[in-house]
Amino acid sequence: MIADENLLELARDWKQSGRKVALATVVSTWGSSPRPAGSQLVVDETGAMMGSVSGGCIEGAVVREAMDVMQGAPPKLLDFGVTNEQAWEVGLACGGKVEVWVEAVE
């Protein structure tokens, strides 16, 4: 696992090597969230990734959006949330919310 502070250097290196690259950043959280604001995920056009913005289905959705952004879609603010009631239904202790900004690295 690469330290969060080195992810921007990795994104730069991947970009300079000719890859299309996107960067996802947790911009806000509320309640239960596996990763704090400022956490980042770097993704390239092959699906290679480093870092983390959450985990599970959220990270998969972020990678799909990152692929779109690398193909020319505008940057996106993604909003994920689980109510306390939904969390109880799947065995989690509480709900939460996370917002993730996804942008292409130019």
Image: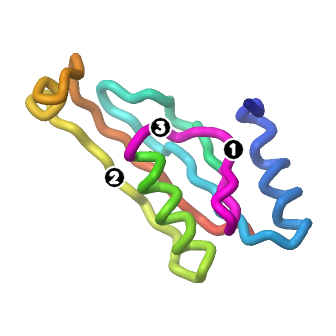
Q: Which residue is mark 3?
A: 54
Residue at coordinates 47% horizontally, 55% vertically from top-left? 62
Q: Is residue 25 above or below residue 70?
A: above
Q: Which residue is mark 2?
A: 79
Residue 28 x/y as whole percent? 43, 40
Q: Name the residue at the bottom extreme.
A: 72
Amino acid carrying label 2: it is Asp
Extent of the magenta region: 42-57
Residue 18 x/y as whole percent? 86, 72
Cα distance in 3D space between marks 3 and 1? 12 Å
Residue at coordinates 39% horizontally, 29% vertically from top-left? 33
Q: Quadrant of residue 82?
A: top left
Residue 78 magenta-drawn?
Answer: no
Cα distance in 3D space between marks 3 and 2? 12 Å
Q: Residues within 10 Å of mark 3 (few under 14, many from 20)?
A: many
Residue 36 x/y as whole percent? 50, 30
Q: Which residue is mark 1?
A: 50
Amino acid carrying label 1: it is Met
Q: Nearer the viewer, mark 3 or mark 2?
A: 3
How many numbered badges does the structure rendering display?
Answer: 3
Amino acid carrying label 3: it is Ser
Q: Residues within 10 Å of mark 1 (few under 14, many from 20)?
A: some
Q: Is residue 76 above or below residue 28?
A: below
* Label 2: which secondary element: strand
